Image (cartoon, rainbow, N blue to C red):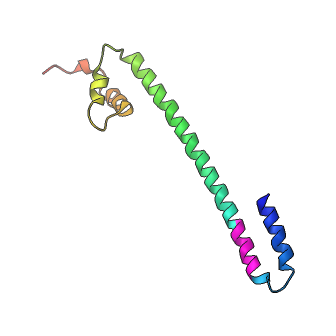
Amino acid sequence: MLYATVTRKIEIMSEQSRYRPWLKELLVSVWAIDAFTLQLRLLVKQIEFIEDQISIIEEAINKVMEELHPKGADYRYVLETIPGIGPTLAAAIIGEIGGINRFPAS
């Protein structure tokens, strides 16, 4: 709407020859700003979509971890006390090593 209004006013003013050179540049600038705004809006929507997917995956990981390792098996939470290891990385470590009971106690 704004683009159409500005474009029409520029076209009216460009009918006068003294305004023509810089008005065409202004029209291109307005179009570029409009395109840039659209691109930013699309990028923000993509980021929001990816953040939603991350939340869903994290919830699924937590659910599986609770089902596989009930509250009595607290080694998941022990792993999470290590700086830099959160629920997702703890789940990956546990998934790689399997049951901690496989290893002899030392």
> Quick check: is 23 in the magenta stretch?
yes
Quadrant containing the N terminus in the rendered view: bottom right
The quadrant holding residue 96 is: top left
* Apparent side of residue 106 relative to residue 43 in the rendered image (left or right): left
The residue under the point 24% across, 19% down is: 102
Q: Position of residue 68 (x, y in %)?
A: 39, 17
Q: Position of residue 90 (x, y in %)?
A: 33, 30
Q: Is residue 78 above or below residue 46?
A: above
Question: Which one is nearer the viewer's eye here, 7 or 62?
Answer: 7
* Apparent side of residue 24 relative to residue 66 in the rendered image (left or right): right
Quadrant containing the C terminus in the rendered view: top left
The quadrant holding residue 70 is: top left
* Apparent side of residue 45 relative to residue 78 in the rendered image (left or right): right
Residue at the limit of the structure toward the bottom, as seen here: 18
The residue under the point 68% across, 66% down is: 32
Q: Is residue 54 above or below residue 43?
A: above
Q: Is residue 24 above or below residue 94?
A: below
Q: Position of residue 54 (x, y in %)?
A: 50, 36
The quadrant holding residue 74 is: top left
Q: Which residues are magenta?
A: 22-31
Q: Position of residue 79 (x, y in %)?
A: 28, 28
- Total labels: the figure holds 0
The residue under the point 30% across, 30% down is: 80
> Quick check: is 80 in the magenta stretch?
no
Q: Is residue 11 above or below residue 36?
A: below
Residue at the limit of the structure toward the left, as seen here: 106
Magenta stretch mostly in which secondary structure? helix
